[in-house]
Amino acid sequence: MEQLSAGKKLDRAFEKLGEKKTLSFELDLDTDAASLKALDAKSDPAPGEEIPDEVAKMFSDAKITVTVQSKKPLDESGEKDLVGTALKVSGPKGDLVEYRVIGDYTYIRADVEAMGAVTGSPMPKADDLPPEAGAFKNVLQGKWVKFDTRKMDEAAAEGGPAPAPSFDAKTQKKLVKALRDVIAREVRFKTAGGGDGTEHVTATAPFRTLVTKLFGELRPLAKDLPPGMELPTDKDLKDAPNAKVTADFTLRNGELSQVDVDLAKLAESAKVKKLGLTLRLREGTRPTAPAGATTLDPKDLLGGFLGGPPMGEGDIDMSGLDVDGPAD
């Protein structure tokens, strides 16, 4: 009776999320730099390829914040129903990159200097670029820039394959049904009260068994997935740890407010102090277009910020700049 009751409560909480038109959530890795370095050491990296301290610190403190707004309830929405989307990645020293899609335009800003320091591939300074670099200088200065989303898709497709199609509504429903079927069979639920309208539902399952069964259910749907999206085989998963993983779902007045997943047991022999994921749901706030964004040609963004210098290499003096980064 408890199994049915706890599972039903969780189902209803997810249904309530689907009834919303705006949803915001924050995802962060609940760990520390020492634990990430211990995991890296267990993977036996080649000399010189160990995870740098600064990168471990960045990942341990990183947070991803997402907001989605639709004209319809989210569980009925398709891509054309979305009126606003926002994503922000924050590190220990502030925001690393922020991205918004509002109407026909995509807005983006980034702390290019901080991202370059983490990746080991510093970008040139804005003052080092020639005047014809135009609005691309604003990218390097961490200012908001905007571009026509449709023109960006066209620029990305030039000389290369068209963007992979996204899941259609029918495929999404099949995926959700497959996920629910596996969870109903393999996951054990328990519920406990917390007072003040708060309740905890815990879900526990052996990791390898769960993912193997899940991908087994998804393989018949492979033909409906975007090209290039390959699913692992049972053989690929046979060495995955089969320790039991527990997710704690916090419900407040029947609505999902937080999910905590403890992954420490998957570390096996690595000396990990803590390793988990935390998802916090927030009241959705409407994504808005930032003021003062400079219009950028998508070809400049693809050629410069995402793929190299925005103009010919001879147009910029790169002497003394580590533009290639480390060998790895």
Image: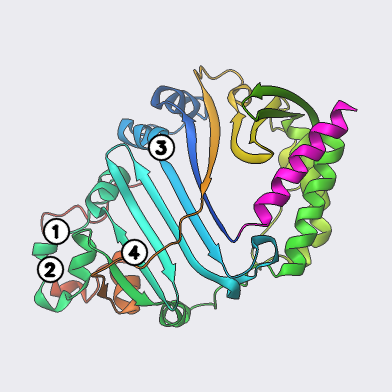
Looking at the image, residue 259 sits to the left or right of residue 131; the answer is: right
SS label for mark 2: loop
Q: Quadrant of the N terminus?
A: top right
Main SS of residues in magenta: helix
Quarter occupied by residue 131: bottom left
Residue 115: tell me if it is visible: yes
* Residue range of the region highlighted in magenta in the rendering: 1-20
Mark 4 near mark 2, Cβ–Cβ under 8 Å? Answer: no
For the residues labelled 4 and 2, the Cα–Cα distance comes to 20 Å
Instruction: Say which of marks 3 and 4 sits in front.
Output: 4
SS label for mark 4: strand
Q: Earlier in the sequence, mark 2 or mark 3?
A: 3
Question: Which kind of residue does numbered mark 3 sit on?
Answer: Phe
| Label 1 Cα crowd, 10 Å radius (few <14 / some 14-19 / many 20+) | few
Which residue does the numbered mark 4 point to in the structure image? Answer: 108
- How many numbered dots are placed on residues in this image? 4
Quarter occupied by residue 48: top left
For the residues labelled 4 and 1, the Cα–Cα distance comes to 18 Å
In the displayed structure, would residue 273 be above or below residue 218?
above
Which residue does the numbered mark 3 point to in the structure image? Answer: 59
